[in-house]
C-alpha cells in the first residue's frame, strides 16, 4: 500500500551551516558583518522514512576570494552539541556557552568543538542570537571551536495531526516532536567531527574541568562495552555517545519523533543496543539552571542533586590505614598526611615508584580527592612528577587493591579533583600517591584529603552508636611498607 511504499522511500537531510569564521571591519563606522558559509547538501540515506526536504538559502553568503573556504576542522576527541529555540522568558544559551568555555582550560579546549543548532524559525530571533554569539565568542569562532547551524522550517516533518500519546496535549506533542527533529539535525551534522559526542541542553552550568573528567572516564571505560555514558541525572543533559552510533540514533529519533520525548527514546535506544542499564556517574558534571520551560514558559525549577556547587565543605577522611615505602625522617609522622592539623610528612630520599597509600577501613564512595605537597609558603619539596590513583574494593588483598585506575596527575605539587563513580559501581578502597620520577631533593606531603558519601544511618548501625554520638573516628598506622 501507499503507506508501506512511503516508509520505504528515502529522504535527503539538508543542513545549512552558519559558520562564524571571521568578523571583519567592512564599514567606516566599525560595523561588523558576520560571514556566513552555507554548506552544500548533506545527505542522510534512510530507506525507512519519508521526509519532505527542500533546500533553501536563508542567508546570503558574503565572502571574498581569500576567505572562500569550506567548513573544515581537524578531527577532535569530542563534539559538544546544543540545540536551542526561542523562550518566552528569555534565552539561557549565551550563559551556557560562557559556562562551557569558562569551565574548560585552553588546553582542554583543543580537544573539543561546540556545535549549536538554532532551531527556531523566527528570523529576527536568529539574527539577534547570531549577532550576540559573534560578538561575545569571537575568539572561539575564529579558533573554529564554535559552529552554529540552522535547519530551514520546510525540512521538518509536519507538526499537525500528530499522534496523541500518554494524555499529552496537542501543543506538547508538537513541541516534543519538533525537539526530536532538532536533535536529529544537530547530531547528523556532528557525525564526522570527533570520536565522541556530548549532548547538552541550552540552560546548563558546567563543572570546572569537565572535559578532563570525561577523558579520564573514557580511559577507564576504554575496554568496556557501553552505548551511552551519563554525566547528569536529568533529561537529555550530559549524555555521551560514540559518534559512530549517531546515525543510528538520528534514524531512531526521526522514525519515532511523534511517539515519545527524546529522553524516553534515548532509553529505548540504549536497550535496543544491548546496554540494559544506565551507566551514570556522580557527581554530575552539569547542572540545569533554567527556571522557565522552553515549552510554555512556566516557572519550573529542576535541579540535579548530584551536582556539586563550588562550596564543597570540609573533607571527610574516614578511618583508614596509611602505608608507604618511603623512609621516615626524624619525628615526621606518616599520619600527618591524613590529619587536619598543620603538621606534614617529610622524606629525604624519594625515588620513582615510591608511594603513600591510604587504605580505607570501609570501602566508600569517594567523590573528591585533594593532595597537597611541598611547603606551604615557599613551595619547596613539591612532587612535580607524580600521580594519584584509585583502587577499588578488592576480594583478593587485605592490605592493597588488585589494580589501580589513574585519577590525575599532580600540577605544581597539587591535585584537587572530583571522582566520577557509577551509581552501581565499586567503592573506593585505596588512594595511592605515586612518584613517577626520582626527586633531586626531599618530599613534603602536607595533606591527603578525601570527601566521602556515606549513609549515616548505616554507619551508625554498623558501629552501634546513636545519632548524638560521634561517628567515624580516624585511625592512622604510619611507617609501614606495602608489599609489592
Image (cartoon, rainbow, N blue to C red):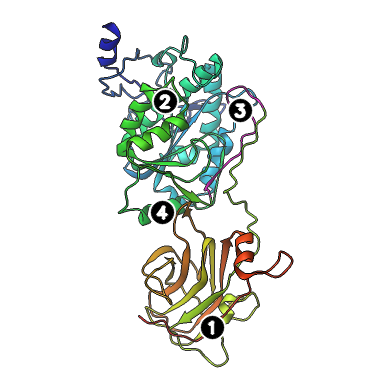
Residue at position x 57%, y 62% in the image: 452
**Mark 1 or mark 2, which has the lower sequence index?**
2
Most distant residue in the bottom direction = 330
Query: What separation in Å lies between label 1 and label 2 (alpha carbons)?
Result: 65 Å
Query: What separation in Å lies between label 1 and label 3 (alpha carbons)?
Result: 54 Å
Local crowd at mark 3 within 10 Å, few (<14), some, or many (≥20)?
A: some
Q: Mark 2 sits on what residue? A: 36
Is residue 219 visible in this depiction of the protein? Answer: yes
Observer-side mark, 1 or 3, equals: 1
Magenta stretch holds residue 115:
no
Q: Which residues are magenta?
A: 284-298
Query: What separation in Å lies between label 3 and label 2 (alpha carbons)?
Result: 31 Å
Badge 2 marks a residue whose secondary structure is: loop
Local crowd at mark 4 within 10 Å, few (<14), some, or many (≥20)?
A: some
Observer-side mark, 1 or 2, equals: 1
**Mark 4 or mark 3, which has the lower sequence index?**
4
Q: Nearer the viewer, residue 476 or 25?
A: 476
Magenta stretch holds residue 288:
yes
Q: Mark 3 sits on what residue? A: 293
Residue at position x 36%, y 55% in the image: 219
The answer to whether 453 is drawn above or below residue 288 in the figure is: below
Pointers 1 and 3 in contact (C-beta within 8 Å): no
**Mark 4 or mark 1, which has the lower sequence index?**
4
Q: Mark 4 sits on what residue? A: 217
**Mark 3 or mark 2, which has the lower sequence index?**
2
Which mark, by number, is residue 362?
none
Q: Nearer the viewer, residue 181 or 75?
A: 181
Q: Mark 1 sits on what residue? A: 477
Amino acid at each position: 500500500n501507499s503507506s508501506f511504499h512511503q516508509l520505504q522511500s528515502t529522504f535527503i537531510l539538508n543542513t545549512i551551516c552558519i559558520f562564524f569564521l571571521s568578523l571583519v571591519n567592512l564599514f567606516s563606522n566599525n560595523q561588523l558583518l558576520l560571514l556566513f558559509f552555507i554548506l552544500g547538501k548533506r545527505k542522510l540515506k534512510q530507506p525507512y522514512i519519508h521526509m519532505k526536504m527542500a533546500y533553501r538559502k536563508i542567508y546570503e553568503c558574503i565572502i571574498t576570494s581569500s576567505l572562500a573556504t569550506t567548513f573544515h576542522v581537524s578531527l577532535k576527541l569530542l563534539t559538544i552539541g546544543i540545540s536551542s529555540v526561542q523562550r518566552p522568558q528569555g534565552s539561557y544559551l549565551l550563559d551556557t556557552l560562557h559556562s562551557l568555555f569558562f569551565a574548560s582550560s585552553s588546553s582542554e579546549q583543543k580537544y573539543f568543538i561546540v556545535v549549536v543548532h538554532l532551531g527556531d524559525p523566527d528570523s529576527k530571533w536568529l539574527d539577534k542570537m547570531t549577532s550576540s554569539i559573534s560578538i561575545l565568542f569571537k575568539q572561539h569562532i575564529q579558533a573554529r571551536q564554535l559552529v552554529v547551524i540552522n535547519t530551514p522550517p520546510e525540512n521538518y516533518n509536519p507538526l499537525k495531526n500528530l499522534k496523541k500519546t500518554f494524555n499529552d496535549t496537542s501543543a506538547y506533542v508538537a513541541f516534543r516532536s519538533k525537539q526530536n527533529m532538532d536533535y536529529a539535525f544537530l547530531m547528523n551534522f556532528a557525525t564526522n567531527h570527533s570520536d565522541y559526542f556530548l549532548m547538552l541542553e541550552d540552560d546548563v552550568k558546567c563543572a570546572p574541568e569537565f572535559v578532563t573528567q570525561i577523558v579520564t572516564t573514557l580511559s577507564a571505560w576504554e575496554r568496556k562495552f557501553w552505548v551511552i555514558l551519563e554525566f547528569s541525572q536529568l533529561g537529555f543533559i550530559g549524555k555521551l555517545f560514540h559518534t559512530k552510533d549517531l546515525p543510528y540514533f538520528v534514524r531512531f529519533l526521526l522514525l519515532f519523533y511523534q511517539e515519545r520525548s527524546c529522553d524516553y527514546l534515548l532509553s529505548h535506544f540504549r536497550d535496543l543496543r544491548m546496554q540494559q542499564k544506565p551507566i551514570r556517574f556522580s557527581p554530575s558534571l552539569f547542572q540545569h539552571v533554567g527556571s522557565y520551560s522552553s515549552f510554555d514558559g512556566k516557572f519550573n525549577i529542576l535541579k540535579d542533586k548530584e551536582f556539586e556547587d563550588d562550596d564543597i565543605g570540609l573533607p571527610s577522611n574516614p578511618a583508614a590505614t596509611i602505608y608507604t615505602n618511603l623512609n621516615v625522617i626524624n619525628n615526621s609522622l606518616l599520619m600527618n598526611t591524613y590529619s587536619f592539623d598543620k603538621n606534614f610528612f617529610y622524606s629525604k630520599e624519594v625515588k620513582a615508584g615510591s608511594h603513600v597509600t591510604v587504605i580505607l577501613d570501609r570501602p566508600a564512595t569517594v567523590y573528591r580527592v585533594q593532595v597537597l605537597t611541598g611547603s606551604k609558603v615557599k613551595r619547596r619539596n613539591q612532587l612535580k612528577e607524580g600521580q594519584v590513583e584509585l583502587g577499588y574494593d578488592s576480594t583478593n588483598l587485605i592490605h592493597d587493591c588488585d589494580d589501580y585506575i589513574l585519577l590525575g596527575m599532580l600540577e605544581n605539587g597539587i591535585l584537587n579533583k572530583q571522582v566520577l563513580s557509577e551509581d552501581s559501581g565499586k567503592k573506593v578502597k585505596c588512594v595511592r600517591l605515586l612518584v613517577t620520577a626520582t626527586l633531586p631533593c626531599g618530599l613534603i606531603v602536607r595533606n591527603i584529603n578525601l570527601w566521602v558519601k556515606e549513609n549515616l544511618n548505616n554507619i551508625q548501625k554498623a558501629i552501634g552508636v546513636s545519632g548524638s554520638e560521634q561517628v567515624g573516628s580516624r585511625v592512622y598506622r604510619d611507617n609501614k611498607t606495602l608489599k609489592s
